[in-house]
Amino acid sequence: MAARSFVIQLQPGVGQALLPDHRKMLPGIQYVVDAETFSKISLGARQSVIKVVSVNLDDTGSANAATASGTFLLAQSSSGVNLMAAASGQSFFSYLTQVGTTLSSVSIAGFAAQGFDPGGTQGVGAGVSFANSTLSGAASNQTVIGPDGSRFTLAYNGTASTISGGWCTVWQDEFNRYISTASGITYTVAADGIGTPYNISAITTLSGVGGNVTTVGTKQGAFAGVALVNIPAGNFGWIQIEGYCPNVAVASGTAVGATVAVSGTSNAGYAAVPTNTTAATSSAGVVTGTAFANNVFGTVLTAPASGASTGGQFFAAVEIRSRRVKKPYVRVLNKN
């Protein structure tokens, strides 16, 4: 039930904009863009430049349409390629939905056809660690690509509580792959001397086997991904970091087409529409109001529905925008 196309228009007060397919947008006119083009629209533009009027989905009449139920399903039906067992006897779907206290219990190596990458997230592991013991959750930078191009990464729940399936997670320690809900995690965006925003580095002290481990220069607080299933405290599990996610906890009443961010005060891991979208930089260089500062990560595709056995929490399908660093577009003049 992924999106096929979006109907969008400019937000009030915006005079013009240029779409990734080079069409010029003008006020008062609605434009239809395909899903691939929409995926290239930056999170900043989604928050402050365009407004999604409607979403056209692949299929709204099948059983797979009812995905906002508190239970993770792959974008395609959980059959066929998703249930093909590897030599281990495990399927792609079963690997993504299992958790464990050791890395070997959740290893997905062998699923090379699914784009397994043992170092798939850029910049991870670059911190300086002064360890007097071994971390309970060792750094393990693994990503995998699903049948529809969605990306998943392995993470460790280093908190004292279970992170529920569908909850938004943030990095408690990005270099060591520790995740948490946003509550109690500091997330600060600052601007350097030429105005480029960046996530301020942090120092973390996490418990390990034999004592605490301090990591200097890690990143903390940025959106990490959406938990696929319940990840108990002290367990590894997979989170989705990009693509169509059919099961994301959202605030009740969130509109289809809304641009959502991690709720910075929620210990229940839900996504919500940012309340402050006016960009500002303080005298200390702290940035507020931008999509980056608000921890924006995607666009709601379906109306929120109350999940079964979730205590009344609401879930919706969300398109998670890629956060991978992209090469800048350079227009080359052909003089031939």
Image (cartoon, helix red, strand yellow):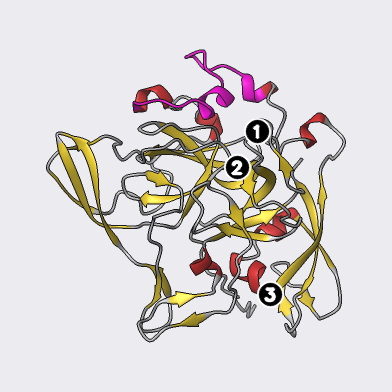
x%, y% of residue 119?
38, 42
90 in magenta? yes
Vertical relation: 222 (above or below) 28: above
Question: Upstream in the sequence, badge 2 or badge 3?
Answer: 3
x%, y% of residue 91?
56, 20
Q: For the magenta stretch, what is the residue range? A: 81-102
Comparing labels 2 and 3, the label whose residue is closer to the camera: 3
Answer few, some or many: residues within 10 Å of disc 1's Cα (few below 14, many 20 plus, some between 14 and 19). many
Q: Residue at x 67, y 43 (%)?
A: 315
Question: Upstream in the sequence, badge 1 or badge 3?
Answer: 3
Q: Dividing the picture into quarters, in which one does residue 29 lie?
A: bottom right
Q: Amino acid at mark 2?
A: Ser
3 in magenta? no
The N terminus: image quadrant: top right
Q: Amino acid at mark 1?
A: Leu
Horizontal relation, residue 137 to residue 233: left or right: left
- Given contact means CB atoms under 8 Å apart, are the residues at marks 1 and 2 in contact? yes
Circle 1 sits in a helix, a strand or a loop, which is it? Answer: loop
Where does label 2 land, which residue? 150
Q: Which mark is residue 49?
A: 3
Q: Residue at x 58, y 26 (%)?
A: 93
